[in-house]
Amino acid sequence: MYEKLPVPFGLVRYGVAPDHPEVKNVINSFSKIAKQKNFRFVGNTSLGEDVTFRNLQNAYHAVVLAYGCSEDTILGIKGEDLKNVLSARKFVGWYNGLPSEKTFMPNLDCSTAIILGQGNVAVDVARILLSPIDELKKTDITSYALEALSSSKIKTVYLVGRRGPFHVAFTIKEFREMTKLRNVKTVLNSGQMQGLDQLLQGVPRQRKRLTELLIKVSQAEQVGDKEFVPLFLRKPTEIQGSTSIEGVKFVINKIDNNLEGKVSSTEDTDYIPCGIVLRSVGYRGTVPDKDIPFDSKKGRVLSNSGVYSSGWINTGPVGVILSTMNNAFHQAALLVEDMNSNKLDTLQSKPGFELISNILSQKGIQAVSFEGWEKMDKVEIERGKQLGKSREKIVDIREMLAIAGE
């Protein structure tokens, strides 16, 4: 397994919210696999830079690409380049200790934030912005993010989507957590819920339960000094301000077909003043090496004999952890099937890691083993104990490499 960063676990380490430690328990299963004698972790190795795709094909009978979708979908509207119009993906990387985002500093010196998008990432960002600091202090959130959030003046977070409440992309677990946040009231306009109860007959159980919860919350009285405000049928058309943000202008959509989620624009508009905008409207797959078979329109890898892909770089940026996991099982089955039917020509000998190791040595690249990660792991846990946290993540790559090489 080749990994760009010196540490393993990818999205589990850098994408899962710090207040969701139970989701990170899968690391224990990954670690058991990593310690098997027929597994090798090679960290600090960048595809397309340190090793090429052709290098990997020359070294191995099969290559599986599982590097995800790493670029944001942009809105393409006026004002998107204003200061404090930020990527939710980068915001998540910032509070989770992703080395490339350690200098990402959002300005939280405002009362209102708007998050554009209504997926689970958007809800994670809203929850982190509104969560009590004393609860975040117990997690593995980075110290610099904790310091910034401690002085945040944000009291209201809008979660804005272009479709109606029947087609929100977040799941019931994430929404229910928001309704239970201490000192935060979830404000749902009951008018936006009209007619939803008539759509529940025969819909999938998960969608039915989520819609019922939305209706229930819209009718309940809540208290709190802070507000979480999901807002539907709003399409952003302009982010207004001179040098910094003043607010966002929206066109109000109407529902054309509720079951299919089809909407269209009206002539009505809305305007919400704010001081920060976080964009969470989707992701795009990229190609780090020109020799990778890639569909640039759909942003995903094209699989063929000897080349496989898994996760969002295979399916496109859709689905949650469960669907991604099922996709991985399917791709693994295809690989085994090709291997058993001799499509991979396994009778032809290939050098494997020996070839890649020589390339990395010639380039002076310090490859990090799983044992090197375990050294970093001990340091992070010890630093966390000193701060009363589960761990304090190392965010400087040079420091990571120094510890791994000791």
Image: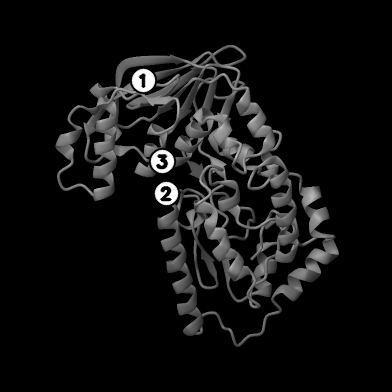
* Location of residue 218 by image quarter: top left
Q: Amino acid at mark 2?
A: Val
Q: Residue at x 69, y 42 (%)?
A: 100
Q: Give me the residue at 63% from left, 53% from top.
A: 288
Residue that badge 2 annotates: 318
Type of colouring: one colour
Who is closer to the viewer here, 121 or 295? Answer: 121
In percent of width and height, residue 175 lies at 38, 37
Indicate left or right for 364 with 97 as reference: right
Q: Alpha carbon of mark 2 to alpha carbon of mark 3: how far?
A: 17 Å
Q: Quadrant of residue 364?
A: bottom right
Above or below residue 2? Residue 129 is above
Q: Quadrant of the C terminus?
A: bottom right
- For label 2, the crowd category at 10 Å Cα-Cα, with few meaning under 14, some 14 to 19 and many 20 or more, is few
Rendered position, 363 above or below 102: below
Q: Which residue is mark 3?
A: 174
